[in-house]
């Protein structure tokens, strides 16, 4: 094989932390991952390489790790490291408008130019979420190539051996190179013994294949569970660097940047990639029953799921998270509305920055990491949306209109003023689904409903035994998640949560029964459709809501306080009428209720550490004996809980 050319090996790292993550997490990753990894790669001669640092992490490092950025900058100046662009705030670009995509990429390219003096032409695509129309916007933004998973190409019907060259695609007559990330390398590095990596690249060379490209999360080199011990203490990284040097010295590989590979290798031709992400993401985005059916199908296919045919057995696309989780959809559609309003009212930089930070992807979906289930990530999105809307509506009088804000085909009441914004959903029980108080930078209705997730009842045959022994490597985080299971299923909410949802229950309630979802509900208005009217008395907006057996009126005052009045005609002396407020922060309540019960809203969700219980907020249930026929509650907002 000595006459065969070397395989061009492109090694890429994606370093990132989300908007809203704890300062201690940033610090821990700087100490445990970013510093030792960059130093080891330089000592071991693993350059040239390609590195992407996300915007939120760049911002933090500027303040707390500028010396590390200086080190990275010297490597970039010496052409040892190629720096990648992206959307600055790590948005899912496919979920943004064209204008916002261009803005996000331009902001990152300008930051890299100003901080490091580089003109980044390659792009790290957040979560590798691809939609065909992205090609035009990326090309317009000055991007020459983008990294996507090889699975995207397999889903387009290509053969695996064709995925070791750059390809070209286009949209609207704008062309761009697309480079396939090798899935096999993503699972070999750093989870398998280095001998398997060496054997793999030698096999590629023997078959005349020119490119081996890895681009993946840098956090798996010491930040993911068990990886610090495996990568550093048990010697995987040292062995990898020694193997890399031996392969290079033998002429079996040549180290290149991703951009170098795109420039040096001929194009394999034109390809049109379908909307896609990586395998696990497409499964996570499915509704729980469909996700379980897909897992059963993959198990039935066995080893075939790892081959090219496996890419044709797919879940769904990233946007389905917005249908699966209404809480994510509310944030997303609010962000789009404010972005459009900001463009209509002028491009004030501080408003655009707040909207950009609210586009950070992590809080909008849920997979092996907590994501949407982490209250502090959602709170960060709502805080930035509150900042943007406060600036946009400064001095504005209280107003309201009916519009379908979440695009589900049912009109909501959008209430807004200089101090707060609220959304009332007549089609879903007339509850308040958003109550954002600008001064508090929080949405008091930001509470996650308790859902049944596919992994709550994971099948036993989907939980492989853990690897044992140094020769076996270590389990990746995706292997670990397959072993998660529960012995007892957690409570599930039968109806989405909001502020002010009414039910007629048998007997006087108690907190334990309410928390378990075991109260005997004679009639629930929580999911019924109400007829809605809007009145505008001086200094307030009043929303009238009527359904069979119940009328309620929500009065919003200019400071964001809400007064709810109720009148009902159903029930007997054995029943109570209740209203439930699911709140994400401290609130002050006044009412004429005959009883009050509270319980924590707790979810059970997977994270990189396993299954975790997280308090999403508090449920406050107020009740009146049914024969009373009427009641009232006044709510004044406090601060966001923001706790795990």
Image: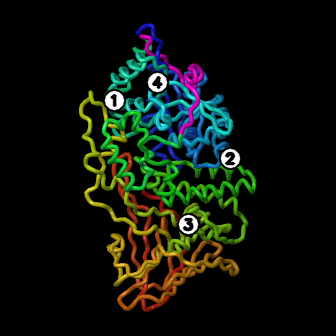
Residue hosting label 3: 434
- Disc 2 from disc 3: Cα separation: 26 Å
Q: Which mark is residue 212?
A: 4
Q: CA distance from mark 2 to mark 4?
A: 34 Å
For marks 2 and 3, the one nearer the N-term is 2
Q: Quadrant of the C terminus?
A: bottom left
Ranked by sequence position, the earlier of labels 3 and 4 is: 4
Between 324 and 169, the one nearer to me in the picture:
169
Q: What distance separates the C-alpha of mark 3 from that of mark 4?
A: 48 Å
Q: Report the residue at 45% width, 91% height from top.
A: 628
Q: Are marks 1 and 2 in contact (CB under 8 Å)?
A: no
Residue that label 1 marks: 192
Secondary structure of the residue carrying tag 2 is: helix
Neighbor class of circle 4 (other Cα within 10 Å; few <14, some 14-19, many 20+) is many
Please tell me how crowded label 1 is: few (under 14), some (14-19), or many (20+) other residues with Cα within 10 Å.
some
Residues at marks 1 and 4 touching, judged by CB atoms closer than 8 Å: no
| Residue 71 part of the magenta segment | no
Percent position (x, y) of residue 520?
34, 79
Report the span colored magenta: 250-273
Foreground: disc 1 or disc 2: 2
Local secondary structure at mark 3: strand
The residues tagged by marks 3 and 1 sit, at their Cα atoms, a distance apart of: 47 Å
Hey, which quadrant is residue 84 in on the image? top right
Helix, strand or loop at label 1? It is: loop
Report the mark closest to the observer, 2 or 3: 2
Which residue was labeled with disc 2? 99
Q: Earlier in the sequence, mark 3 or mark 1?
A: 1
Determine the CA span between mark 1 and mark 2: 42 Å
Cβ atoms under marks 3 and 4 closer than 8 Å: no
């Amino acid at each position: 094989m000595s006459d065969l050319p070397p395989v061009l090996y492109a090694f890429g790292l994606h370093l990132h932390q989300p908007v809203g993550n704890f300062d201690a997490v940033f610090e821990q990753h700087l100490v445990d991952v970013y510093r030792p990894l960059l130093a080891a790669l330089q000592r071991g001669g693993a350059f040239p390489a390609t590195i992407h640092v996300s915007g939120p992490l760049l911002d933090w490092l500027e303040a707390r790790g500028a010396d590390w950025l200086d080190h990275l900058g010297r490597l970039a100046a010496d052409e040892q490291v190629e720096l990648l662009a992206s959307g600055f705030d790590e948005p899912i670009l496919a979920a943004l408008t064209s204008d916002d995509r261009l803005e996000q990429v331009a902001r990152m390219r300008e930051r890299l130019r100003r901080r490091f003096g580089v003109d980044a032409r390659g792009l790290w695509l957040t979560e590798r979420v691809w939609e065909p129309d992205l090609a035009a916007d990326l090309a317009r933004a000055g991007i020459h190539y983008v990294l996507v998973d090889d699975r995207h190409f397999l889903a387009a019907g290509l053969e695996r051996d064709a995925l070791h060259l750059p390809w070209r695609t286009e949209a609207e007559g704008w062309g761009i190179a697309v480079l396939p990330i090798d899935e096999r390398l993503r699972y070999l590095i750093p989870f398998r013994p280095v001998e398997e990596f060496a054997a793999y690249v030698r096999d590629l060379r023997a078959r005349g294949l020119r490119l081996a490209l890895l681009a993946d999360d840098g956090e798996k080199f010491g930040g993911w569970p068990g990886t610090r011990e495996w990568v550093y203490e048990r010697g995987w990284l040292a062995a990898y660097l020694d193997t890399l040097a031996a392969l290079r010295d033998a002429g079996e590989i040549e180290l290149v940047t991703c951009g170098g590979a795109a420039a040096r290798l001929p194009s394999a031709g034109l390809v049109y990639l379908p909307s896609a992400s990586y395998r696990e993401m497409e499964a996570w985005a499915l509704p729980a029953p469909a996700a379980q059916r897909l897992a059963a199908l993959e198990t039935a296919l066995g080893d075939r799921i790892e081959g090219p045919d496996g890419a044709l057995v797919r879940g769904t696309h990233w946007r389905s998270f917005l249908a699966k989780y209404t809480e994510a959809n509310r944030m997303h559609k609010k962000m789009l509305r404010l972005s459009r309003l900001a463009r209509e009212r002028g491009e004030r930089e501080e408003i655009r920055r707040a909207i950009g930070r609210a586009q950070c992807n992590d809080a909008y979906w849920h997979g092996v990491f907590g994501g949407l289930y982490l209250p502090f990530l959602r709170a960060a999105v709502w805080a930035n949306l509150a900042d943007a809307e406060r600036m946009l509506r400064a001095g504005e009088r209280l107003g309201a209109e009916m519009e379908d804000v979440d695009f589900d085909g049912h009109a909501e009441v959008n209430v807004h003023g200089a101090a707060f914004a609220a959304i009332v959903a007549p089609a879903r029980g007339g509850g308040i689904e958003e109550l954002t108080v600008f001064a508090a930078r929080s949405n008091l209705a930001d509470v996650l409903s308790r859902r049944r997730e596919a992994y709550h009842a994971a099948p036993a045959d989907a939980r492989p035994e853990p690897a044992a022994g140094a020769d076996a490597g270590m389990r990746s985080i995706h292997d670990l998640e397959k072993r998660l299971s529960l012995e007892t299923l957690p409570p599930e909410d039968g109806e989405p949560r909001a502020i002010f949802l009414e039910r007629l229950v048998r007997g006087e309630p108690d907190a334990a029964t309410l928390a378990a979802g075991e109260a005997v509900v004679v009639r629930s208005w929580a999911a019924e459709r109400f007829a809605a009217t809007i009145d505008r008395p001086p200094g307030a907006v009043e929303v009238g809501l009527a359904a069979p057996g119940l009328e309620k009126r929500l009065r919003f005052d200019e400071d964001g306080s809400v007064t709810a009045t109720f009148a009902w005609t159903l029930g007997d002396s054995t029943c109570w009428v209740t209203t439930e407020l699911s709140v994400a922060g401290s609130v002050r309540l006044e009412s004429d209720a005959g009883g009050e019960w509270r319980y924590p809203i707790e979810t059970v969700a997977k994270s990189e550490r396993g299954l975790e219980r997280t308090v999403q907020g508090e449920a406050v249930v107020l009740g009146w004996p049914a024969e009373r026929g009427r009641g009232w509650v006044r709510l004044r907002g406090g601060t966001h809980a923001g706790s795990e």
